Amino acid sequence: MMDENVSATIRDVARLAGVSIATVSRALNARDGVKANTKKAVLEAVEKLGYNRNEVARSLKFRQTRTIGIIAPELSNIFFMEVIEALERCLAPKGYSMIITSSYDSVEEEKRKLQILIERNVDGMVVMPSGAEGDHFLSKALANIPLILVDRRIKNLRVDSVETDNRFGVHKMIQALKNEGFHRIGFIGGDPSIHTAGERLNGYLEAMSLYGLRIEEQFVLHRGAMTQANGRGLLQQALSLPDHPHAFFIANDSMHLGATIHAIENLDANELSKLVFASFDYLSYAPLLKFCHYAVSQQFEQIGEEVATLLLQRLGGNWEGFPKRVMLQPEIKVIVASGGIPFEETSKTSSIDEILQVEKTF
Amino acid sequence: MMDENVSATIRDVARLAGVSIATVSRALNARDGVKANTKKAVLEAVEKLGYNRNEVARSLKFRQTRTIGIIAPELSNIFFMEVIEALERCLAPKGYSMIITSSYDSVEEEKRKLQILIERNVDGMVVMPSGAEGDHFLSKALANIPLILVDRRIKNLRVDSVETDNRFGVHKMIQALKNEGFHRIGFIGGDPSIHTAGERLNGYLEAMSLYGLRIEEQFVLHRGAMTQANGRGLLQQALSLPDHPHAFFIANDSMHLGATIHAIENLDANELSKLVFASFDYLSYAPLLKFCHYAVSQQFEQIGEEVATLLLQRLGGNWEGFPKRVMLQPEIKVIVASGGIPFEETSKTSSIDEILQVEKTF
DNA sequence: CTGAAAGCGCTAACAT
DNA sequence: ATGTTAGCGCTTTCAG
C-alpha cells in the first residue's frame, strides 16, 4: 500500500500492474508495441492509484518544460491581458503553459523576473518591456531561449518583436481631425522615453507637418506616465491657456478617460460642445467617451496570434528572418454617433513608413 | 570547453573551479562551511560560464515547485486580474511563481486545466470556478494540493474560499435607493446558477422584502451571462414595459455599461433624467456611468491578500479551521456627483447574515 | 513485447 | 572543509 500522503509514481503503477516501469512508460505514452493486455493492466493500475504523470521529471529528462514565460508591466491592464489571452488560446492547444509575471513597470523588477524565468527553464519568453533599457536581455542564458518583445521595442536590441504601427495610427487621427476641419490640434501624451509614448508623439509631429498644420508647442503636452491622473492634469493645463485649441489627440485610453472626466466635471456647456478628441485605444467603455470622434483600435487578438506564431516557429528551430519585426496595422474607428466624419480610406493598408517614404532605420 | 548550445550545469562549474559538485551546491546555497577561497572560485566560475541554477532539477529533488496554479474564467477581465495581481504581489516575494490559465468559462476546459496543473506539480491552486459543478475538484491528487476558491463557491465542496459578501453589497444598494425615495426597484442580472449572479439576485429579493418593497416580477430580469450585450437587452426589455420603474439595481459592471449605453443611445432627455442605477463593481471608468448613484466596490487587493495569506498558511501545513470561508465586506460608494445621497452607515461592519440574523447554512 | 539500467541536474547524507 | 554517491520520477537505449 502506497503512502497516502504522497502521490503515486510510475513505480507504484508498475508494481500494481506487475510489470516494469519501462512498460508503464511505454503504455502511457503510446510508444512502440505494448500488448493490449498489459496496457489494460497498466491503465487499470493508473486508475486505481489515481496516478498523474510528473511533468517535472519529464521536463528534466527532456530538457524542455513546455512552459512560456511572460513578463508584463501590469497584470491589471486590459491591453496586456487581451494579448496574453490570445496567446494562451494559441499556445495551450500545443501543450504549453504560461508562467505570467509582472514587472510593475520597473526595470529592476523586470530583471528579477527574467532571472526567475531563466532558472525555471522556460522554453520561450514573451516580454512587454517596461523601459527603454534592456541590457539584461543580453544575458548569456537567453541565447538558448527564444524571446519576443511585444508592444514596446528596446533600442539596439536585435530580437524578434511584434507591435502596433503607432505612427500610422496617430497619422490617421490627425488626418481625420483635419478632414473634419480642425487645423489646431493639441497633443496629450506621456514621457517619450517610453517606446509607445515616443512613437505616438513622433507620429503626431510627423503628421502635423505632413499636413501643413502648425505645431503649437505649448499645447504639445507629454509628461509622466500615461495615467488617468495625468490625462486630467494635462488637459486642464491645456485648457487653462488662453486661445487654446478645441481638438486634441490623446495618446492612450487611461489619459483619454482622465481627460474626459476632467471635461465633464469642470467645463461649461459651451466649452463642452466644442471639445473634440481623437485617441489611441478603443475598449469596452469607448461609447462613453463622448468627445471622441476617432480612435485607433489595436488588434489584441491579432497581436497575440502573431506572437504565438513567431514564437512557435522559433521554438521549432526555424530562425528565418531573425530578428523579425512584425508591425501590425490597427483598425481606425470613426465614431459617427459622437460627431466623427467618415473619410475615404486612401491608404488603409500602407504603413506610416510607406506613406512618408522614410527608410526604416532599424 | 562546454557545448555552446546547452547551458552550463553545476558540473561545468565544478570542473572549472576545480572542486566537486557538492561544494558548488554548498557555495551557491550558502549551506554549511565553505572556505572563502573556494567559494570565490566557484562564484567566478559561475560568472564566467553564465551558469543559472536549474529549478526543474531542484523541484524534482525537493518535490515542490514553488509554483501556484491559477485558473480564471477569463484573463481579459479586470476583476480577476486585479485579484491575481494582488496575489502575485504577495506570492512573488516568497519565491512563488504562478502558472496562469484560462477556463474560458467552460467547465470542460476547467477540468483540462486542472489536470495540467496537477501534472505540473503545482504546490497550490487558486481557482475562480467557472460553473456550479465541481466534481473534478474531488480528484485524488488534490488531496495533497492546497486549493482556494475565489469569488464563486461550489456547492457541497468542502474547501477554503474567499469571496465578497455579495448579499451585503446588494442589500446596501437597495437600502440606499429606498433612502433616496425609490420604492420601485428593478433588477438586471445574470443566470442565477452562476454563484455571484445567484447571490446578487437572492440579496435583492431578501433586501426588497426586508425593506417592505414590492417585488414586481416582470422587472426582475436575470438571464444569460452578465455581459454588456445582455445589460443592454434587459434594460431595453424593462423599459419597453408600461409603467416601468426608473430605478434599477444592476448586477455587475459589464451589464451596467451595456445598460448605460443603451440609455444614452435610445432614451429622450425626459426619460434620461429619471433613470437611476445602483450596481455592483466600481472600476476605472465608473465616473462615466452617469446614472449611477450607488455602487458596491469590491476590494480586489484585499481579496488577493486574503487568498495569499490563507494559501501560504496551508502551504505551511497549517490546516486550522479548514474549510475556511472568508467573506469580505465590499466598500459602498455613494456617487454624489450623479445624485447619490449619503446615508448613515448603520451597519457598515456587519455582514448580511448578521443583519438578517440568519444562520449560516454552509 | 518487455526488463534492466543509465542519466537528466540537483541536494544531502555519509565519508574522509 | 570537501568529495562520493544515492536518488527525486521519468524516458530510452540496449538486451533478451
Image: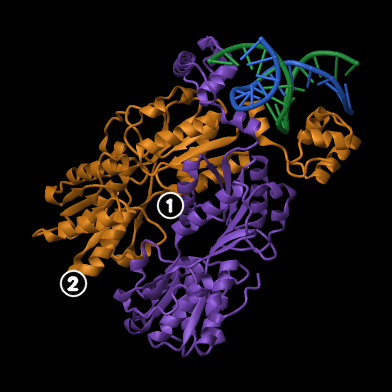
Chain colours: A purple, B orange, C green, D blue
- Residue at the location (52% across, 15% down)? A4
Taking depth in this image into account, of B142 and B163 the one nearest to the observer is B142
Q: Which mark is residue B186?
A: none
- x and y, in percent, of residue A57 in the image: 61, 28
- x and y, in percent, of residue B127 in the image: 43, 37
- x and y, in percent, of residue B301 in the image: 48, 48
Secondary structure of the residue carrying numbered label 2: loop
> What chain is tagged by disc 2?
B
Q: Nearer the viewer, mark 2 or mark 1?
A: 1
Graded by Cα atoms within 10 Å as few (under 14), some (14 to 19) or many (20 or more), the crowding at tag 2 reads few
Q: Picture quarter containing residue A2? A: top right
Q: Earlier in the sequence, mark 2 or mark 1?
A: 1
Tell whether B300 sits left or right of A140: left
- Residue at the location (63% across, 39% down)? B95
Q: Which residue is mark 2?
A: B268
> What chain is tagged by disc 1?
B
Asked if B104 appears above or below A13 in the picture, the reply is below
Residue at mark 2 to residue at mark 1: CA–CA distance? 34 Å
Amino acid at circle 2: Asp
Taking depth in this image into account, of A283 and A141 the one nearest to the observer is A141
Taking depth in this image into account, of B357 and A198 the one nearest to the observer is A198
Tell whether A54 sits left or right of B159: right
Q: Which residue is mark 1?
A: B76
Secondary structure of the residue carrying numbered label 1: loop
> Which quadrant is home to the C terminus of chain A?
bottom right
- x and y, in percent, of residue B86 in the image: 51, 47
Q: Are marks 2 and 1 on the same chain?
A: yes
Q: Picture quarter containing residue A310? A: bottom right
Q: Is residue B202 visible?
A: yes
Amino acid at circle 1: Ser
Asked if A8 appears above or below A209 in the picture, the reply is above
